[in-house]
Image (tube, coloured by chain):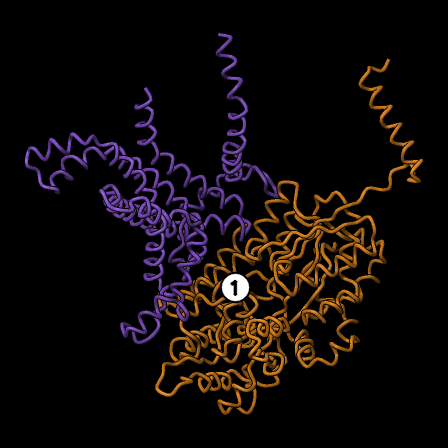
Chain colours: A orange, B purple
Amino acid sequence: MLDSFSKRVISCLGAAAVAGAIAGVPAAAPAADVTITYSDWQLAQDIWGKSLRDAFAEFEKQNPGIKVATEPVALAQRDVKFTTAIRAGAGPDVFALDANPVKQYIAEGWVKDLTPFIDKEGGKKYLEDFYARALDPVTEGGKVFGIPKNIVAMVMVYNEPMFKDAGIAKVPETWDDFRAAMKKLTKATKPGGPVDQWGWTIVAAKAGFDLRFSAILRGFGGDFLTPDFKKSALDTPQAKEAFKYVVDMIHEDKSMPPGVAQVDANAARRMLANKQIAVKIGTTWSLPEVSGMNPNLDGWKVLKMAHIPQKVVDDKSVRSTLYQKSLFMNPNTKNPEAAWKLIKFMAEQKQMQKWFDDNLMLSARKSVNTTYKPIVDSPYAVTVTNEIDRAAFLPLIPKWPEILETFRTNLQDAIAKTKAPEAALANAHNQINAILARP
Amino acid sequence: MRDNYKGYLFILPAFLMLLVILGFPAVAAVLQSFNLMWVSKPAFTLRAYTALAQDPEFLRSLSNTVLFVVVVVSSHLVIGLGVALLLNMEVRFKWLWRVVAILPWTMPDVIGGLVWRFMFDTLPGIVNSVLLRTGLSAEPVDWLGQPDLAFGAVMLAESWRGYPYAMLILLAGLQSIPRQQYEAAELDGCSAFQKFLFVTVPNLKHMFIIALVLDTIWESRLFGMVFSMTGGGPGYSTQILTLLSYKQYFQFFNVSYGASMAVVLATVLFFISLPYLRMSMRQQL
């Protein structure tokens, strides 16, 4: 027997169904909307954030019933937020990562294996348009855990009129020429005044250190680790030369602004935008960002790009570092099918073309970089695309974040003169070997 | 008996909430330090604690923390007492001075760190700007790039931001000293300094211990100010224990190791807080 409350509920539901039918609404409720959460540090940035939101609007139009809720996260807090949430069984359904922490995410099970979804799309055929090396960071044990979106190589970004003013006719291709050019660019712009223009700056603060310093190290033919990632390679003559070269340019040449230990990627951009420096290491994203910081610079006109200098011209070895942004699915997602649809959509050719139009970022798909006319016609894109084959990822191992920070800390000691460059590098070498030897 | 039961029932929700909010993270940190929770391969081990004893970075951070806490808490007590004495005097617009004196305490530590970082910035910072314009320095000083200067700058910034906490405790103590004691001292012919020494100081003893213990705990746990001002650099020069624990846990994903540092710090702070706990329990009995 039904009690009076149950009877009331049933009669109300019945009345609602009848009312719906009368109003022309189907009695069966439509499929409930699915909301996918997406988190990305670039959501917090004006230009990049707008591109992402435009893409989600398009996705929602193409996929009625799936909504995308955005969750911006600061780059510095990204891993704190993601890893804590995922450990607790929560977190965004889809999120973006650069290549640095990916192997740790895979090892800890913080990203979902996407191989079954890729197999449904055609498996190898679906993946063959992506650069083979772009799949390295997201692949482990034959399983694919992420879909690469953008890939770029680091290059030298310079202010051409400042070079001309300093009498530098040719962009330096060797480190010796580069050092001489940086000395020429360092000067007081007002007669009798203090030095207020410097050649360049390295990034020695945490944000952006990895991509920039590694490019210098590789330009000298050195690297952080041996090719098998088992030992430190900081005891090689190339690494020693690169380390001393940078420290000498700070202390002896003074061709970098004082306070270099606190310079992060954004501070370097600001200095280039304000013509305090003439050169920095960057890539295609430098153009919109530096130009946006100081519209009076006329960045799209005055800024040019060239490859990282080397010890010997025409040396064919690796001379730069690759940056890659990829998309991942949270293993805790309740809507894996919808999450995959979003990842697939974001990695489509059309979206990657839009990403270049909006942000000058190259695609992880070969077909986009080689056939999309704006990319083929862009001198910036051509310079950076040519460098992709001359660049390598940073070591793709779970211990990499700790190794990098150990190296950076020792470099800061050398910059602060608390250790001689040789002693600081030897210390970094020993500490990194100890980290690698740990189980 | 029945009333007692009801009383426990009333405090049960608050007790449960405290247990979840305070107890769970503490238990989780201990379990993680023994590699038993939120790790890919849980298995009991003391490896994190044995590694701590041999880690020069941990020992360096520990000594940095001790130096930082000693200097900063001392400065808080000295500045706090001085300002509390001034605010306890009969002056015009006393309420306004009190508001001004407490302002640094209202600033979140991360924001405070960023403000001081901009002030000490080598090129556009106001400190260097003043030094260069007045001719006190011929070239910009790298305040946050030199280990000793950076450590000094961080301690100065935190001394400024945190002194109102000690000041408020000591001001409350000053206001509770019976006026008659000062009047008796005046009748005995005591000077202002003697009144301070023989009336104010003995009466402030308990408040002083409270301020000392609570501020020591607070400063030992400090994170945002140092993180946003120097990030622990240059090198390891301003790295305190909380920063190292954060780095190990969230940046290097060494969960057990990061948690073991937090457990060690919490244990030390528990013993530091014992005098305060004993004193407050004695007052309740």
Q: Secondary structure at mark 1?
A: loop
Residue occupying the point 72% across, 56% down: A146
A145 and A17: which is toward the camera: A17
Q: Is residue A278 above or below residue B86?
A: below
A25 and A193: which is toward the camera: A25
Q: Which residue is label 1 attached to?
A: A232
Q: Is residue A158 above or below residue B83?
A: below
Task: Please tell me in which quadrant of the rendered image residue B17 appears.
Answer: top right
Asked whether the viewer can see residue A422, the reply is no
Residue B219 percent across, percent down from the top left: 37, 45
Callout 1, which amino acid? Ser
Residue B202 percent across, percent down from the top left: 18, 34
Residue B28 percent across, percent down from the top left: 53, 36
Residue occupying the point 79% across, 49% down: A66
Q: Is residue B34 left or right of residue B84?
A: right
Quarter of the figure that contains the C terminus of chain B: top left
A390 and A21: which is toward the camera: A21
Asked whether the viewer can see residue A205, the reply is yes
Q: Is residue A6 above or below residue B210?
A: above
Residue A367 percent across, percent down from the top left: 79, 71
Residue occupying the point 44% across, 62% down: A409
Structural crowding at the residue carrying mark 1, measured as other residues with C-alpha within 10 Å and reported as few (<14), some (14–19) or many (≥20): many
